[in-house]
Image (tube, rainbow, N blue to C red):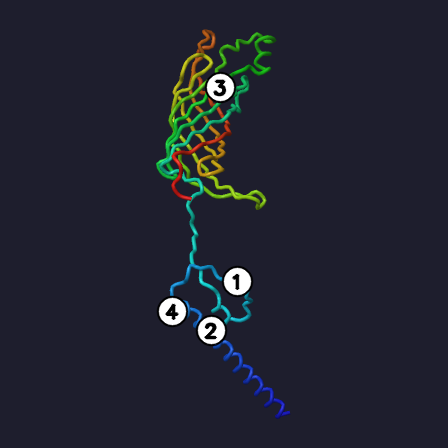
Amino acid sequence: MRHLKNLLLVQLVLLACVTVAQAQEDGEDIENLFNKEEQQAPVSSEKPAAQDKKDDIKDVSDLGRLSTFSDVAVIQRRYLPKTGRFEIYAAPSLVLNDAFFINFGVNGRLGYNFTERYGVELVGFGLTTSQRQVTKDLASKRGVETRSLITPKSYYGLDFKYTPIYGKMTNSGASITPFDLYFSVGAGMTGTNQGGTEPSLHLGTGQIFALSKGMAFRWDFSWNVFSAESNVETSRGRSVYNTLLISAGVSFFFPEAKYR
């Protein structure tokens, strides 16, 4: 029994020694790997052979055969640069929140980007207006004077545009499309169906999806706020009006980008 205990004790001691020796060997391999990287000559720009990339790594010592990265680029320039470039935007537009009229027209912008984030933009849109069925019924069936109802016909102004977010999106892995998300604020004048023009506040947001270095798809959602008074004698009184306008079209950037 005593001999059996002694034999087990000897085996445990031998196993511990082998484990320590293996750990020291692995540690020395890792240290040699870092020392080799620090002492090696400048890396050639030539690409490693395809066979080298397929070598199997079976042990820590095999890591020394890996090729060091010749160039690593983590942050890339934007595919569609905007700094120092003009932007022309044209799109069909539709008013979303007018209960009495259908307003459809064209939205145009001319902007200049000081940096990738900041820019200014001349804004303008014109709308055609037609009465909804409810408006026609109010006049024909209930005798309500619908000429006093106010709706926007046009707008022109100047916006400050801020682009805090940009990224990339993919369509099922088939393609990658860079995009920007922007916000804008400005002021201008709104023309109404009453024939007058009123000072207005203009807020907006939207996205720009790059199609090339000079062209992009852009959608825009705008909120136009103005105060107006009807010119119908029986409906005098100034009220505040809110117009929600959605647009989707194409932007062109110039001059041509110098890089990429």
Where's residue 196, x and y in %?
Answer: 41, 13
Q: Amino acid at mark 3?
A: Leu
How crowded pointer 1 is (Cα within 10 Å; few <14, some 14-19, many 20+) is rated as few
Q: Amino acid at mark 4?
A: Gln
Q: Amino acid at mark 2?
A: Asp
Q: CA distance from mark 1 to mark 3?
A: 62 Å
- Which mark is drawn over residue 29? 2
Q: How many marks?
A: 4
How crowded pointer 3 is (Cα within 10 Å; few <14, some 14-19, many 20+) is rated as many
Q: Amino acid at mark 1?
A: Lys
Determine whether the residue tagged by mark 2 lies in a helix, strand or loop: helix
Quarter of the image holding residue 39?
Answer: bottom left
Query: Could you say which is closer to the camera, residue 4 or residue 217?
Result: 217
Q: CA distance from mark 3 to mark 2?
A: 74 Å
Query: Could you say which is closer to the camera, residue 83 or residue 204?
Result: 83
| Quadrant of the drawing holding the C terminus | top left
- Which mark is drawn over residue 127? 3
Where's residue 176, x and y in %?
Answer: 52, 44
The answer to whether residue 105 of the structure is visible from this angle is: yes
- Identify the mark nearer the N-term, 1 or 3: 1
How crowded pointer 4 is (Cα within 10 Å; few <14, some 14-19, many 20+) is rated as few
